[in-house]
Amino acid sequence: MKEPTEFALRKFVAPEFIFGIDARKLTGRYAKNFGARKVLVVSDPRVMAAGWTDDVIACLREEGVECAVFSSITSNPRADEVMKGAELYQREGCNALVAVGGGSPMDCAKGIGIVCANKRDIIAFEGVDKVELPIPPLICIPTTAGSAADVSQFAIISDVQRRVKFAIISKMIVPDIALIDPVTTTSMPAELTAWTGMDALCHAIEAYVSTAHSPITDLFALQAIRLITSNMLPTMVELDNIVLRGEMLLACLDAGLAFSNASLGAVHAMAHSLGGLLNAPHGECNAILLPYVIEFNFPAAPDRYREIGKAMGLDMDGMASRDALSALVAAINHLNKQAKLTYTLGQLGVDRGIIPTLAEKAMHDPCIFTNPRQPRSKDIEAIYEKAL
Amino acid sequence: MKKPSDIEENWESQREKIIGLGERSLRKTYYPELQQKLDQLERFRALLDQSNDCIFLIHVPTGSFIDVNESACRQLGCSRQEVLALPLERFFPEDALAWAREILAAEREQEWDRDAITTRMFKCSGGELPVEINIRLVTFRKELYGVAVARNITERKLAEEALQRLNNELEQRIAERTADLEESRTKLETQNKELQKTYHELAVETTALQRAMEDLREKDRMVIQQSRMAAMGEMLGNIAHQWRQPFNVLGLIVQDLGLSYESGEFSQELLDSNIGKVMEILLHLSQTIDDFSNFSTPDKEKALFKVDQVIVKTISLIKESFKNKHIAIDISSSDDPQINGYPHEYAQVLLNILMNARDALLESRKENARIAVRAWNENDRSVVTITDNAGGIKTDILGKIFEPYFTTKDLGKGTGVGLFLSKTIIEKNMGGRLSARNTGDGVELRIEV
Ligand SMILES: Nc1ncnc2c1ncn2[C@@H]1O[C@H](COP(=O)(O)OP(=O)(O)O)[C@@H](O)[C@H]1O
Ligand SMILES: [Fe+2]
Ligand SMILES: [Mg+2]
């Protein structure tokens, strides 16, 4: 029997999206339908080099939509890069945004949209529901299967001065359309495939155990976990297998729909803190932290973690709690190992001395508020220490 | 695991917001903004409609009205639909249309504003509306539009008529004023007469001034005379030199007569011979006095004289004293130049120049001091140059030597008027030219008459 708490109020927001091979080619049509006269195409050097940006620009031009390109962004978009992009948007007289790339260009495009519509520095929008005015039409074409920024209400921006990544969470920044095309993910090397895959797995797991989860988000989360466990390693072997890429991108989309609405937990809060300080790959930070956070959280949601184990193909029926936990952690460690994600935080350059600072910052990240177990600073410190 | 309640609360409220139950948790919608923009637009529309000007928006490619303000409809007496449905020709006369078409023919926006034209518009109700019209091209979303603003100038027309009336009145007033002016003119004439009287007084004053100037000239003459006296003093020295030798000779002759008597050698022959010698000497002395007195008497009238003669005479006066100071004088002459002028004054000029040369030569302690005097004719004029080898005049004072009272000599030795007077004599009195220039080793004074 379900508890009445299962029917507490929940909202589900998802953008319109088109999933499938060559979805990116619809960019021009959508831009035109949104009334775009000139779009700012936000991308990054690696995606440019892979050719996806030009592909999209060609589609836009074909429909008579003018383009300006902003691609000078680093792997974690910085606040000053967002401001520069906004300046370019205004200067070029753009009236719509197209993001082509992974989490960085998409988050940057969201940031640019926020600044252009609200005319204030991007730093001012940190937190939940701080964006007042709607951003210009935003079309996202993801080229990685990880961040799911193309369907989420999240934007993660680096504040170089404070050395933190901060989260902007607002329904105002959900893209108007996501054109999710597995073809664009075929250019990802094995390493990046692993990082982004583990990011997506974290999204799914954290969304599933989140205190803001709902029956709808649960469906997406569990499906994502299933798809990632069975497809991530094969994809790393067959990088241009479009079916495997499609499965992984679908998993990423599922996870995105789940976490965008159910939010995340301590893994992401702690990874954002790490990323701000080290500029380390987001997926890698997540992969390292996930097992330790599960160990900490498990007592608060043992049944949910068992469901996760089941979705990963583990047989945990009748297993003692302690054993179920160790089976789940072992499965994740195994996945990490197979994907060659074997580093420790120490190897990434984390020093014991900065752990209190990292923990302090993690305690203020909005992702922490939906963690199944409410941690104290010293709990977070302990997790970081284990992961050293 | 108890927490302070405010952290709990914050935690809970943040979670609520993330779930999407916050007050500001809204899906992106442009409608509120759109509504705001529409309101703005409506407000702007109302503003345009309120304007007294008729505003028309013309779509350039099709050459038809696509929008018109309320004021235009009201003043033309048609509905908006009517205006938009009718062609431009329905509202404007041919000349205004041609003007408008020319502006609208431009391919793009123009930098400058065309001048407005004054024309009229045809009302739907049949009447006419006098307007001043202005068209400006605007590009909007790559399409070219013409914004025509027609201002109703009925009232201005009335004002212009009123102005015309005022003008007429003004003309009337001007006529009246002309009469007044005639009166003023008479007054002016009287004033003019007074002015003439003043002019006469001025003329009297001028005469007085002229007299004063003559006085000044008189003074000039006196200066010349004084200088002449000074020169005479100088001359006395020369005469003294010239006379010492003959006096010595006279003494010797007289003594010779006495001695020969005592020795018994006295004879009639010796007496006659000595008397002859004495007479010759006395004649020479008397001649010198003549020369001297001639020289010091100012010329009364112009006379034709031979330059060579004046030169020889002047030099004869100073020859002896110059020889004593070991100053050689060369004279060379050709063409026998003649001058119609004042020979004594001319001689005085020569003397002045020669004295200056002497002073300069003595000052410079030159070994073979020499003065060259040359005379010839050049272009119908006589030219005399007096050149010395005393070293010349420094260029910074060369321009000043003809100024009155300019001197480089010690007090008592120089007066500084010598060259000034010489220049006056040659240039003012005889219409010639006196100039000075440095040669390699001295000065050349050039007199042209
Ligand atoms: N032959 C000359 N050589 C050098 N200097 C001369 C000569 N003649 C005139 N001067 C200069 O011109 C000045 C003006 O001469 P002048 O008017 O005769 O006045 P003064 O002889 O009384 O000084 C002289 O003081 C002298 O400096
Ligand atoms: Fe993530
Ligand atoms: Mg002198």
Image: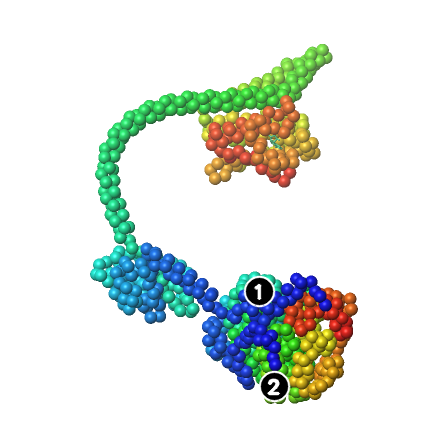
Q: Looking at the rendering, which quadrant does residue A228 occupy? A: bottom right
Q: Which mark is residue A70?
A: none
Ligand 1 - quadrant of the structure image: top right
Q: Which amino acid does label 1 sit on?
A: Lys
Judge depth for marks 2 and 1 and give the one in front: 1
Q: What residue type is labelled 2?
A: Glu
B387 or A171, which lies in front? Answer: A171
Place of residue B306 in the rendered image (x, y in percent of width and height, measured from the top left)? 50, 30
User: How far apart, in angstroms, are the residues tagged by discs 2 and 1?
Assistant: 35 Å
Place of residue B268 in the rendered image (x, y in percent of width and height, measured from the top left)? 64, 14
Q: Mark 1 lies on which chain?
A: A
Place of residue B253 in the rendered image (x, y in percent of width and height, measured from the top left)? 66, 16
Name the N-terminal-most of marks 2 and 1: 1
Work out which residue is located at the far left of the displayed protein and give it: B126
**Above or below, comparing residue B430 to residue A300 in the picture:** above
Q: Which residue is drawn at 64% across and 15% down?
A: B271
Left or right placement of residue A99 versus residue B132 in this view: right
A324 or B152, which lies in front? Answer: A324
Label 1: how many Cα within 10 Å (few below 14, some 14–19, many 20+): some
Asked whether mark 1 and ligand 2 are closer than 8 Å, the reply comes as no
Q: Which residue is drawn at 69% across and 31% down?
A: B365
Left or right placement of residue A207 versus residue B194 in this view: right
Q: Mark 2 lies on which chain?
A: A
Q: Name the quadrant of the N terminus of chain B.
A: bottom right
The residue that mark 1 highlights is: A130
Q: Is residue A262 visible?
A: no
Asked whether mark 2 and ligand 2 are closer than 8 Å, the reply comes as no
The residue that mark 2 highlights is: A247
A172 or A31, which lies in front? Answer: A172
Q: Can residue A38 be seen in this view?
A: yes
**Above or below, comparing residue B245 to residue A132 in the picture:** above
